[in-house]
Image: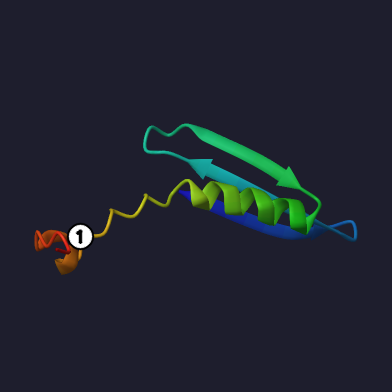
Amino acid sequence: MVVVRAWRDSHRIVIRVLVADDGNATNGWVFADIDAACRQIASVLSELIEPEPRSAPSDSDTTGDTGR
């Protein structure tokens, strides 16, 4: 689970990013810079993406044609 909260405090923005896994372990970061927060969020979200499976071989790869 990824939770992002942002609010204004004393004329500045505060962004809090919390990450919890299935075992309830939690990591958290607090930012005053939007760009830094976005980089961290992108990093966290990229870890959630599973690698795509390799594509199946095309028909030309499986025909056994040796090109003779």
Which residue is at 28% across, 54% downward? 54
Is 59 situated above or below 39?
below
Which residue is at 67% across, 41% downward? 29
Percent from the top left, x then y, of residue 63?
Answer: 9, 63
Callout 1: 10 Å neighbours few (<14), some, many (20+)?
few
Percent from the top left, x then y, of residue 1?
Answer: 45, 48
Which residue is at 15% across, 68% downward? 59
Q: Which residue lies furthest to the right in this view?
A: 11
| SS at circle 1 | loop
Q: As shown in the figure, which amino acid type bears the numbered disc 1?
A: Pro
Is 17 situated above or below 56?
above
Q: Which quadrant of the structure image shows residue 55?
A: bottom left
Q: Which residue lies furthest to the bottom in this view?
A: 59
Q: In this view, does 32 lie to the left or right of 11?
A: left
Percent from the top left, x then y, of residue 50?
Answer: 37, 50
Q: In this view, does 56 lie to the left or right of 40?
A: left
Q: Residue furthest left?
A: 64
Residue receiving disc 1:
57
* Image quadrant occupied by the C terminus: bottom left
In this view, the residue in front, 57 or 65, is 65
Q: Which residue lies furthest to the front in this view?
A: 68
Percent from the top left, x then y, of residue 13?
Answer: 81, 58
Which residue is at 55% across, 52% downward? 3
